[in-house]
Image (spheres, coloured by chain):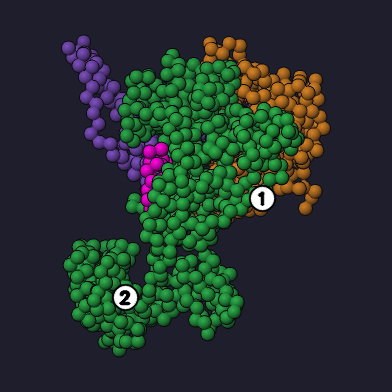
Chain colours: A orange, B green, C purple
Amino acid sequence: MSEYKWRYGLFLGCVIPNRYPMIERSIRDVFEELDAELLDLPGASCCPAPGVFRAFHIPTWLVIAARNISIAEELGVNPITGCNGCYGTLRDAWFDLEHNPEEKKHIQTILAKVGRTYKGNLEPKHIVQALYLDMGLNYLRDRIKYKFNDLKVGVHYGCHIVKPSDKRPWDGEYENPTFLDEIVELTGAKSIPYKDKFMCCGAGGAVRTAVKEVAADFTREKLTNMRDVGVDIIINCCPFCHLQLDLGQVEVNNFYKDIIGEPFKIPVIYITQLLGLAMGMDPNRLGLMKNHELTGVSPFTSIEPFLNLVKEQL
Amino acid sequence: MTESKNEIKVTGKEEPKIGVYVCHCGINIAGVVDVVALKDYALTLPNVVLAREYKFMCSDNGQSLIKEDIEAGLINRVVVAACSPRMHEPTFRLVCKEAGLNQFLFNQANIREHATWVNMKDPEGAYEIAKDHIRMAVGKARKLLPLEVQKVSVEPSCLIIGGGIAGMNAAIDLSNEGYKVYLVERTPTIGGHMAQLDKTFPTMDCSACIITPRMVDVARAKNVEILTYSEVVEVDGYVGNFDVTIMKKPHYVDQEKCTACGACVESCPIVCGNEFDLGMATRKAIYIPFPQAVPGEYTIDMDHCIQCGICARPDVCEPDAIRYDDKPEYLKVKVGTIIIATGWDLYDPTELKQYGFGRYPNVITGLQMERLLSSFGPVLGKPVRPSDIKAPHSIAFLQCVGSRNFKEGGHTYCSRVCCMYATKQARQYKEKHPEADIYIFYMDIRAFGKGYEEFYESAQREYGINYIRGRIAEVYEGKENCIVIRAEDTILRKLIEIEVDMLVLSCGLEARADSDKISSLLSVQRSADGFFMEAHPKLRPVDTLTDGIFVAGVAQGPKDIPDTVAQAKGAASGAAALMAQGEVEIEPYFSVVIEHLCSGCRSCQSLCPFGAIDFDEFKKIAVVNPAKCKGCGTCVSACPSGAMIQNHFANLQLNEIINVAVKKSTIENGGK
Amino acid sequence: MSDNVEKYIKRKVYKSTSSDIAQKFVDAGLEQMRACINCGTCTGSCPSGRRTAYRTRVAIRKALTGDVSVLQDIDIWLCSTCYYCYERCPRNIPVTDMIIKLRNIAVEEGYILDSHFGLANNIFYATGHGVPCNAENQKQWRDLRESYGLPALPPTVHSYPEAVKECQTLMNEVGFKDLMDNAAKLKEERKAAAEKAEAEKKAKEEEKS
């Protein structure tokens, strides 16, 4: 074994690798810096997405989720994900199977048909759970090299990292969690309270796929509330929220231009990107620099203002 | 109770002559099994000399059947195969006693609850099980021995724990009936929560006005010894003979010398929160809880007192009544009965973060609102918003806070009084501020009592209070600390988001936080909801399962003042009935030591959960106190020498039951 | 005269309030739904309800009283599964799980949006990803990955075609393909019926004029 202190199986899901690879880059490199090994899970599929596929057919959702967990079990590691949706699926599926032995046996029988075993002894984790509970704030604090002196952050938790609270590791807290704010404030940034801070971004539950405008109205409300208190950037821990707040921001500026006043231009940043900067890492390793000439790709809302603040303050 | 002229002497050495009576119980038993066949089966069992079947054995005719057979000398043991002994064992025992047979030579086989009722779809199975029960009951009857009930005397005095409206009422009634009462109250004054209320529904009587005369009555009552600022620390004994130790907490003020002039309060430099006003007003470290306190005694709160010595100075306390070196005093009393009247705590809504209690200043509890409305409260009866001390133009009430909650750890019960107290508070505020907008957010309005529905109707029609059917989902703070409420008007399917100046959470009632201490002190059980458990929810609401101990008021479950007073009077009556008889019968299921087998190892003594076993230092053997022994059987199984016998459940009886059950012995197969 | 009849006469009195839908929930072990006392906490907490016609409590009530419109309307698909209703329900009903189950029943009966159907049947089933990047017209996403030093295709099903087959086998095993085929069939039938009714209505109107 190398000098790694923790080992996880990185469950990528869909949005991180296929639409926001900069998030993947920052997660891999930040965890490397923190002495945590991230193994690849070969052949992992869509988790499957809780809002769409669980809504269509629960048995499908359960068996595909169990299959993904079994890939991590084969490598003997806890599956870890940077996406609230994947976390919701893997964790809820794992929890439900652990509490329903008949269902678990049934799933094991089906998986056996493709030569897979499912034990359920390795709990699925979120990268923020690993940062906050496995590594702890003190461990992270020791690795902070630079601190912001005036960065106002609107922290967006999303929904599935805290709810359903009986299946999450946060002691039942869901009205007012603070763990993500605490990690953000390690970097010297200030987490600014804003109206309806814990409200959903609108993407999940198949809403974005069903009617984009409805999802965009959720986002409009969140962006308005954040702009009203003057945040510089938005920090999140879910690529679907990230997408909804980023690409969704452009959609809001389009669909709702009549009621929002000035168009929104708040940079949307993923938690490991911010943390990595404070740890003194090269922005290239965090997916913050644009080294291509592609069009029609993420980020859709410019992060230039944030990069300027980084240059000034760090 | 007539004693029979011919009392049948039974020594246990004569041949048992068992009579078996199989009851039809209407169709409950006869509808599933063939009772005549069961009767015939009984006749095949060893020592059964006669068997009968009858429609309802518990009826007068049924009872006569048994009585006649005993009086004719045909039988000296009785087995009735019918319902559960919990229903009619006392009935049949009495029949035996009246016919001249010792009542403990009776045994009941439960072929209803244990056979026919649980196997209604399987009559053959039910029949087999009924046969088993009859055979086992007959087996035990063969080995039964006569026993005598014990009688113990009852002290004509009562300990009442809790000096609120329940405790006070019970105390007055018992005192009037001539019994001595020890009224123990843990705070420095009697009065309880009712003293904190402003007006009471539905009559709008001023609570202080109706309770203070009662408080004075209690103080003047001939036979009541009020022990305020005291707690019960030990209870030993059994019904009629409880040995109680009461700790009188030190006031640090000599009550004989104190003239209640109040100079000490003026001079005290320590200001702290006032529990009576729920933290909305202050008091000093030396204080009297409220002006009308009974007894009017001053107390120093040592958790806050810094012993600066100012109040003790001769120019402050002229009578020299301050005693920093005061110590607790212990009082030992003997009482015959105990009444638990410990009342309630208000649910603390801090954990319901979506309502902002503790974070937003203008969210308060119903009891805090009560103090704001009170004419001797922190704002002398003119409620204001905590944030800016201005009268609110709009108030919202939320019902069912902390009650009717089926989440893990929540109180599932309805607290019964909150619908009415919110309506009352809303009316009171409207009387002072007719132009104010008042909303009550509810799931159901429970206005069940006398005059309650009319009170609610008047609140709507006359006072214009807005009742919105929808439980508040969440609140947030708006401009100037106003509270913005999000809810659904479920009747109109409309989502509403309204601003109010103040939100009152109608919190429910919960059992006292230290109820478990009382529970273990007195060996009384609590129900799943945390309140003390009554002996029977319908028929014995103020008795507990521990003989001699009663419960009254909200200590038994949430209720309003009329029901509390009714229960207090009921508990007093129950206690008085016991004390009036002067003695009480105890069932003889206690254990007995076979002296020559006892080796004096004392295992039984350490294991007895009721402390019923003493050790005779002279004879060096264990001795059982029959009155304390509850017949649990722990000592019997623990005794390594087999020196303990349990009356009515002795090994020889239990072995017989097991033998006949397994071997299915009848006369045909030789009874083996 | 007949215009007023059409405008004002609505003989809408429900003859039955029993529910097959409720029975499906009980059979699935979700009988907690019957404990609903309609307090409205779920609706009051719902961020979607604030901007759409979706009313959480009403959806549950419709399911309990057998109103099949709850399966046909789009309302239950506007729930973003934020779980606030689930957390705050005083009767401890897992409300979000109820809505998900209603969606399952709706899909069984062929009520699924075209966009969702396409996502499930064509994208998810075919590639194993809900949001893939291996199609011809998705090269920019693969290039974006490479610009960050990552392999063009992630080590997921995209790099392991046998894994895709494995997922499809599993999905066939639990009946996903059958469900989709059935939904497609029912949608076709309803579409044809609707077109026929539209044509008949047009013909009648042309006849009048």
Question: What residue lies at 49% left-to-right and 34% top-to-bottom?
Answer: B195
Q: In what quadrant of the picture does the C terminus of chain A appear?
A: top right
Tell me if B366 is positioned left or right of B492 in this view. Answer: right
Letter of the chain that mark 1 sits on in the rendering: A
Residue B102's label in the rendered image is 2
Please provide percent x and percent y for residue C109. Answer: 36, 38
Q: Quadrant of residue B36?
A: bottom left
Q: Does residue B556 sit above or below B292 in this rendering?
A: below
| Residue B398 visible here | no
Q: Are marks 2 and 1 in contact (CB under 8 Å)?
A: no
Q: Which mark is residue B602?
A: none
Measure the alpha-carbon separation of dots 2 and 1.
74 Å
Q: How many marks?
A: 2
Per the image, label 1 sits on a secondary structure element best described as loop
| Residue B371 image offset from top left, x and y in percent | 52, 28
Q: Which residue is mark 1?
A: A77
Q: Residues within 10 Å of mark 1 (few under 14, many from 20)?
A: many
Which residue is painted at 58% across and 23% down in the image?
B386
Q: Residue furthest right?
A: A145
- Asked if the stretch drawn in magenta spans residue B294, the answer is no
Vertically, is B186 above or below B649? Answer: above
Residue at the (35%, 27%) spot, across then down: B456
Residues drawn in magenta = B556-574
Q: Is residue B200 above or below residue A58?
A: above
Nearer the observer, A141 or B306:
B306
A168 lies left or right of C5: right
Kind of residue indicated by mark 2: Asn
Chain letter of disc 2 in the image: B
